[in-house]
Image (cartoon, rainbow, N blue to C red):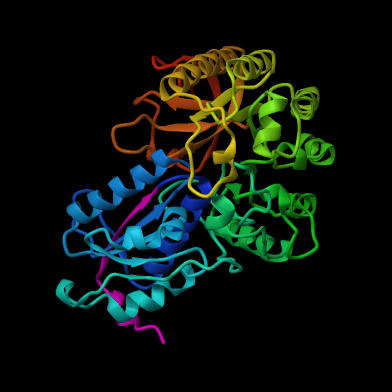
Amino acid sequence: MINSSAFQGKTAAYYTLGCKLNFSETSTFGRVLQELGVRTAEKGEHADICLINTCSVTEVADRKCRQAIHRMVRQHPGAFVVVTGCYAQLEAEEVAAIEGVDLVLGSDEKAQLIQFLSENLDRSVEARTPYYIKKTKDIKSFAPSCSRGNRTRYFLKVQDGCDYFCTYCTIPYARGFSRNPTVASLVAQARAAAQEGGKEIVLTGVNIGDFGKSTGEHFIDLVKALDDVEGISRYRISSLEPDLLTDELITFCAESRAFMPHFHIPLQSGSDTVLKLMHRHYDAQLFADKIYKIKELMPDAFIGVDVMVGCRGETPECFEETYRFLDALDVTQLHVFPYSERPGTSALKIPYKVSDKEKKQRSKRLLDLSEAKTEAFYQRHIGQEAEVLFEKATRGRAMHGFTKNYIRVELSPRDADASLDNQLVSVQLGELTRDKQALKGII
């Protein structure tokens, strides 16, 4: 039985690291707490509850998580501090040992948060004992999530977990095997978002193309059903494995009412030698074929690509192969991250190791390539008319929004107006902003 009175008049602060799935789950936590009477703390205001949703995709991510936890404890002395997410799942004891942490929740225990808070929130700091729930080997639960937090776009969690077990990755251990709710339940959540005034939904998950393992359905079934939801003008697919990005799905997105010409596809390496060492489920040619198919049907599609540099086994020759492959490919942006050794992964058995110095040099070369590709993509659209969904500006930043094909558009202070938040507005795309991260929008 939840003691709802324990939440009345309380404030909460949230901090999310990592992927859009984490953001979606944090937003849902916040929404539940808000319904119980908890207000989000203003900047600089002391919070009664702190929730940190962590990531563990790299060693750097682990370090950022620890730093974020220490910072939240320091900024909100005496607050009830909850840590959840992948780092909390993989290193529960380590997180629980951090001074000031009161509760560590693994992947299967997130539903217990509200009950635990209602029973312990009013305890004095001296009476609290750090508590964590040990990880389980078989993570089965699925926590529904469709929320926008303080943003304009909604994030709909359609899938969780992964069955791939790539040699460098710990996510299956942190998130469990692939699982999903029904198409019907997700359509119902999308309709609820539309009734709240939502216009754009981002589909999130760990390996969303694997949708259907739990229900016998398929990802294309979900996409077609969501496209029929009235009121939602735009959908974006956060990330799709290339071997699960079917020609049928590409064709449907090209012809659909609401699925945008915007794809995010993890490549990791353009070298077949490295892809085999990673135990990826495709080769470079299959990846290239998917890009060609998208561009054939949607020439102006934005395509983001994940690339890992410096993994074990990536010789200089293998990296050069990746660079040449990406240079020749019509993609828009590269999300580059250096390989990080993760305890318990089979990649540690691969003998060839890349130095940190070499990883940085390789990363810089790919980031420079990405910048050139993105700028060229933006330049091609200058002078065109485009429909932009605007988002409320964060403090100190220009009001911005995105076109259908994910070009960031910024408004001048003269044209910016809070009433434009969550509005689809036709603008003329002007020149690049000074930082080359957006085009100037002219209303």
Which quarter of the picture shows residue 316?
Answer: top right
**Res 228 visible:** yes
Where is 327 relative to 187, above or below? Answer: above
Question: Depth check: 99 or 205 in front?
Answer: 99
**Could you tell me which residue is drawn at 44 percent across and 48 percent down?**
55
Where is 37 relative to 88, above or below? Answer: below
Q: Position of residue 196 (x, y in %)?
A: 53, 58
**Res 438 visible:** no
Q: Where is residue 175 in the image (x, y as percent from the top left)?
A: 56, 57
User: How many numbered marks are there?
Assistant: 0
Q: Where is residue 428 in the image (x, y as percent from the top left)?
A: 55, 20
Q: Per the image, is 404 magenta?
A: no
Where is 50 relative to 18, above or below? Answer: below
Question: Depth check: 312 or 186 in front?
Answer: 312
**Could you tell me which residue is drawn at 47 percent across and 23 percent down?**
359
Q: Is residue 176 left or right of residue 84?
A: right
Q: Residue furthest bottom?
A: 1
Q: Position of residue 185 (x, y in %)?
A: 67, 66
**Could you tell me which residue is drawn at 36 percent across and 76 percent down?**
116
Quarter of the N terminus within the rendering: bottom left
Q: In this view, does 66 lie to the left or right of 361?
A: left
Question: Depth check: 209 or 346 in front?
Answer: 346
**Could you tell me which residue is drawn at 48 percent across and 70 percent down?**
109
Q: Is residue 54 left or right of residue 366?
A: left
Q: Give the range drawn in magenta.
A: 1-16
